[in-house]
Amino acid sequence: MSLVSRETDALAQYAALVRKWNPAINLVAPSTLTDFEHRHVEDCLQVVELSAERTGSWLDIGSGGGLPGLIIAIERPDLDVTLIESDRRKASFLRNAVRELGLQNTRILADRIEDVARLDVANVSARALAPLGLLMAYVSQHLEPSGRAWLMKGRSWQAEVEEAKKVWAFDLTSHPSRTDPDAAILEISGIHHV
């Protein structure tokens, strides 16, 4: 079995797990389940593609149902991936998914982001978690000085950037989303308080 088919099989198995658990835990909006592969998996694969040259440890904060953290872990078995999720039921789902998918590179922390001791990771990701200003506090708490954040933001991302710049200084490259014309993936580095 080739590496590509193993990853494709793992993504399909992950989608099946979300569909199975979603009625009990609400991992994603029920209305998005029919189009899960495009709406969620393809969306998160953009982060994998954009960060392809990155190495080192990876932290996904507010992981929810594992988006994009589990997608990154599946596609990048060379990275050590940590997912933080404070909702115990969602963390249970994530642990089960890691076990069923055989992800040896992944650990789950069932805790609040701000309560986890500094991790000093090379990469941080988040999707639909919090306004950018608050997100920057979480990211800066765990990102090493030369690290990079990959933040998936919706239609108000530009206003969020302007608001965040009142408190934070950072280098930003915005990548338009292929799955939502109003959304963007924000590649952020050099984060510090103004």
Image (cartoon, helix red, strand yellow):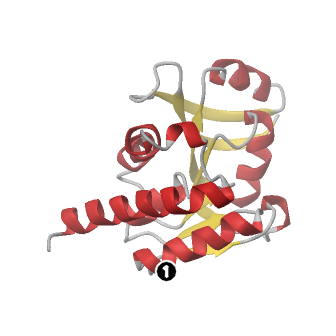
Quarter where residue 46 is shown: top left
Horizontal side of 42 relative to 56 (left or right) equals left
- Amino acid type, label 1: Arg
**In percent of the image, x 39 and y 47: which residue is there?**
45
Q: Residue 106, position in %: x, y?
A: 52, 74
Residue 175 vs 147, above or below: the answer is above
Horizontal side of 132 relative to 67 (left or right) equals right
Q: Residue 120, position in %: x, y?
A: 66, 66
Residue 99 vs 133, above or below: the answer is below
Q: Residue 145, position in %: x, y?
A: 65, 55
- Inspect this view and state whether residue 39 appears: yes
Quarter placement of the C terminus: top right
Horizontal side of 96 relative to 51 (left or right) equals right
Quarter placement of the N terminus: bottom left
Residue 130 vs 85, above or below: the answer is above
Q: Nearer the viewer, residue 100 or 131?
A: 100
- Inspect this view and state whether residue 187 appears: no
User: Residue extending furthest front?
Assistant: 23
Q: Secondary structure at mark 1?
A: helix
Q: Nearer the viewer, residue 100 or 6?
A: 100
User: Residue extending furthest left?
Assistant: 1
Label 1 Cα crowd, 10 Å radius (few <14 / some 14-19 / many 20+) = few
Task: List the residue tagged with mark 1.
Answer: 99
**In percent of the image, x 60 and y 34: which residue is there?**
171
Horizontal side of 163 relative to 180 (left or right) equals right
**In percent of the image, x 61 and y 55: which residue is there?**
23
Q: Residue 88, position in %: x, y?
A: 76, 69
